[in-house]
């Protein structure tokens, strides 16, 4: 392929690439004339065909690279610009070797974030690989290894995604285009979601019967679902009650309808009664309302491998915004969370803290920016208090804390790592080993508190419902457990948060979290009451009556350095009006604790706990199962993300032909080379 090298040495290469079915050309290029180049199974490789295309493109021609029923449309970048066509990807370099291709693309080898090797594949397999790479650049959804879960394609701030494809005799370099992929619909024929609003049990029964009948006769269940959602969006807030039905198929929907019909009679007869099913259907006859909504932010250690790995497909515009705000890859600690299973267990305290806040930040933005949900209350479990302030538009630049958390002695050596704060409290030299551990034990707090004076190097940092956490010298903790007559589950994590030695770090923590607040924070956050875990009450404002950096920093430092009594925090928040607890973070560990606390207090029926995420669950299903109780409890929100995705999905299912909205998204991704 000497001619490839020759051509690459003479002129730069910029070719706009679009993908799609043969008979579904994007409207922006439908009027252009294309030379079709067929890729057949008999061809030895794709190199020769791409070289042919390159020669014709250099002459100003447009190419339709065709294999089976798929096209890759190739246009000179200038032609695409004149047509106001936003490409899915851009071909920017080629060469006989990887090095020459990167040089031709005027890139550095470190710019290439994905290297795809199909040098020994057939021509049709190579075409499929090129098609998939274009799609990955377009959707920002990629996996280098088919054996690993795919996830968002992260990139450095303000940098385009760049990938290379190695074929038999040449390497080609592609970068992301300016087209923004439309959101994948959260709802489809395998994720059915119906909302029915009514004032009485009789109204519900009538509408359920109508839905049962229409779901059988309709040809397109998705159209019926769209009509239901549009009707609710228009008039649902005028009704007293709302129920949600969820199912994975039509027959499942029939089962959910039948179950709901039977449950309604009993629900309306009981006070504080609700009904929910494993599929996600939900109804409450005593809606808690917007005024009871509390966001709850979990603490360190809830993150897990491949968490939130598909959410970007449903909210691409949001992810693009988050990417522009700061180093999104670092926000989620992506290199540690996504590469391989089990990696989260090896993360440092600082990395766990960053990833946990990152997960809460993303989920908060989905609720507040996409669904326009605003909490009446907010509280955090341990480090979740910092996540609360970072996520709810209070701090000016929360991303600045990422690097600081990775390097601050607070997290690297004082209360973790070498435990310098503990050594100072115990008067232990830096060379003397400390075997630190923490244990979860099922026990009331008082018996442990009674024993602590006899075990001076063991502490009770956390009280949480029917369990407690003890921490300190591992052997001392084991001796305490033995005296207590209880078995503890070792966490095998080194952190001295919420123990007396941490109090020596109070000033350092206060200074660390003393962050400038947004200018309009007291307007944007005025509807939310922030509850401090240290005081078990709303954060005390200064004489100005406004939230400021001093108040926030002190609240976090007090929580960080003192014992966390999560039981009292939930009880206090209930007394202040919080009854609908939404866990905004990775997994559902905090939800489990809240459920146990409410049950022990006899408040299970009067409260509702909603996890946004659950390890092992599908991201879209997790979200829908969280929305259902919020809708039934009459929380203010918009259904636009559900409606827009479903409407787009139905529109693209139209008969074959030119697709007016395909490949014509105009959002420019920052960092895209021009």
Image: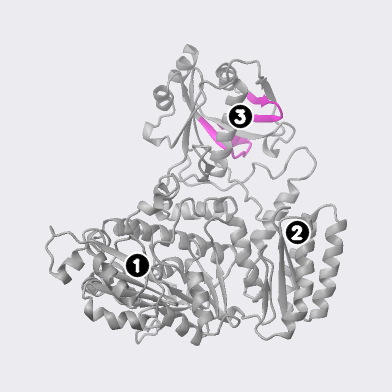
Residue 663 in sight: yes
Task: Answer with left or right where residue 230 lies relative to residue 380.
Answer: right
Crowd tier of the residue under label 3, counting other residues whose Cα lies within 10 Å: few below 14, some 14–19, many 20 or above: some
Where does residue 607 sit, x and y in percent of width and height? 57, 80
Task: Answer with left or right where residue 129 lies relative to residue 341.
Answer: right
Marks 3 and 1: in contact by CB < 8 Å?
no
- 303 part of magenta stretch: no
The residues tagged by marks 1 and 3 sit, at their Cα atoms, a distance apart of 51 Å
Label located before the other in sequence (1 or 3) = 3
Label located before the other in sequence (1 or 2) = 2
In the image shown, does 649 or 119 lie closer to the viewer? 119
Which residue has dot 3 on it?
Answer: 128
- 63 part of magenta stretch: yes
Where does residue 635 sit, x and y in percent of width and height? 62, 75
Range shown magenta: 62-91
Viewer-side label of 3, 2:
2
Q: Which mark is residue 252?
A: 2
Which residue has dot 1 on it?
Answer: 439
């Amino acid at each position: 392929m000497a001619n490839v090298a020759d051509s690459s040495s003479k002129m730069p290469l910029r070719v706009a690439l679009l993908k799609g079915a043969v008979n579904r050309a994007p409207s922006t290029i439908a009027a252009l004339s294309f030379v079709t180049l067929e890729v057949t199974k008999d061809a030895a490789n794709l190199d020769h065909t791409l070289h042919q295309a390159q020669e014709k493109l250099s002459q100003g021609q447009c190419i339709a690279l065709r294999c089976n029923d798929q096209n890759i449309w190739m246009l000179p970048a200038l032609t695409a610009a004149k047509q106001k066509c936003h490409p899915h990807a851009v071909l920017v370099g080629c060469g006989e070797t990887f090095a020459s291709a990167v040089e031709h693309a005027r890139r550095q080898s470190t710019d290439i974030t994905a290297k795809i090797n199909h040098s020994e594949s057939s021509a049709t397999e190579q075409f499929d690989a090129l098609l998939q790479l274009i799609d990955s650049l377009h959707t920002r959804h990629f996996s280098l290894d088919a054996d690993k879960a795919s996830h968002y394609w992260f990139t450095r701030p303000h940098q385009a995604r760049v990938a290379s494809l190695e074929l038999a005799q040449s390497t080609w370099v592609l970068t992301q285009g300016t087209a923004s992929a439309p959101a994948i619909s959260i709802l489809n024929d395998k994720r059915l979601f119906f909302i029915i609003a009514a004032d009485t049990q009789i109204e519900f029964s009538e509408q359920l019967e109508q839905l049962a009948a229409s779901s059988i006769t309709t040809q397109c269940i998705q159209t019926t679902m769209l009509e239901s959602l549009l009707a609710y969006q228009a008039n649902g807030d005028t009704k007293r009650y709302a129920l949600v039905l969820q199912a994975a198929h039509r027959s499942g929907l029939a089962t959910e309808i039948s179950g709901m019909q039977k449950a309604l009679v009993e629900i309306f007869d009981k006070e504080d009664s609700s009904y929910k099913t494993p599929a996600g259907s939900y109804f409450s006859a005593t809606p808690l309302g917007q005024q009871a909504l509390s966001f709850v932010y979990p603490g360190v250690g809830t993150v897990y491998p491949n968490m939130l790995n598909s959410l970007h497909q449903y909210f691409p515009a949001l992810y693009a915004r988050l990417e522009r705000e700061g180093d999104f890859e670092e926000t989620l600690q992506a290199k540690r969370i996504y590469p391989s299973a089990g990696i989260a267990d090896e993360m440092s305290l600082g990395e766990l803290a960053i990833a946990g806040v990152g997960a809460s930040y993303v989920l908060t933005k989905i609720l507040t920016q996409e669904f326009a949900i605003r909490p009446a209350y907010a509280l955090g479990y341990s480090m979740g208090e910092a996540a609360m302030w970072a996520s709810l538009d209070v701090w000016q630049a929360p991303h600045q804390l990422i690097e600081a958390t990775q390097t601050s002695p607070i997290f690297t050596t004082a209360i973790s790592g070498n435990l310098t704060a503990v050594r100072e409290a115990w008067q232990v030299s830096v060379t003397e080993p400390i075997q630190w551990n923490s244990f979860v034990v099922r026990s009331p707090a008082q018996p442990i508190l009674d024993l602590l004076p006899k075990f001076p190097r063991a502490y009770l940092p956390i009280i949480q419902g029917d369990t407690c956490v003890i921490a300190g010298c591992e052997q001392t903790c084991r001796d305490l457990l033995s005296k207590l007559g209880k078995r503890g589950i070792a966490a095998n994590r080194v952190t001295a948060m919420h123990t007396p030695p941490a109090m020596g770090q109070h000033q350092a923590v206060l200074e660390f979290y003393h962050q400038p607040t947004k200018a309009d924070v007291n307007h944007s956050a005025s509807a939310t009451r922030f509850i401090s875990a240290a005081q078990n009450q709303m954060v005390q404002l200064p004489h100005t009556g406004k939230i400021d950096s001093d108040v926030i920093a002190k609240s976090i430092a007090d929580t960080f350095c003192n014992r966390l009594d999560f039981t009292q925090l939930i009880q206090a928040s209930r007394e202040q009006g919080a009854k609908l607890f939404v866990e905004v973070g990775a997994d559902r560990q905090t939800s489990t604790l809240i459920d146990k606390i409410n049950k022990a207090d006899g408040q299970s029926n009067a409260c509702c706990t909603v996890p946004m995420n659950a390890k092992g669950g599908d991201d879209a299903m997790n979200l829908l199962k969280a929305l259902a109780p919020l809708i039934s409890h009459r929380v203010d929100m918009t259904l636009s993300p559900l409606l827009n995705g479903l409407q787009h999905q139905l529109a693209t299912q139209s008969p074959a032909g030119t697709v007016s909205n395909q490949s014509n998204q105009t959002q420019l991704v920052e960092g895209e080379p021009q």
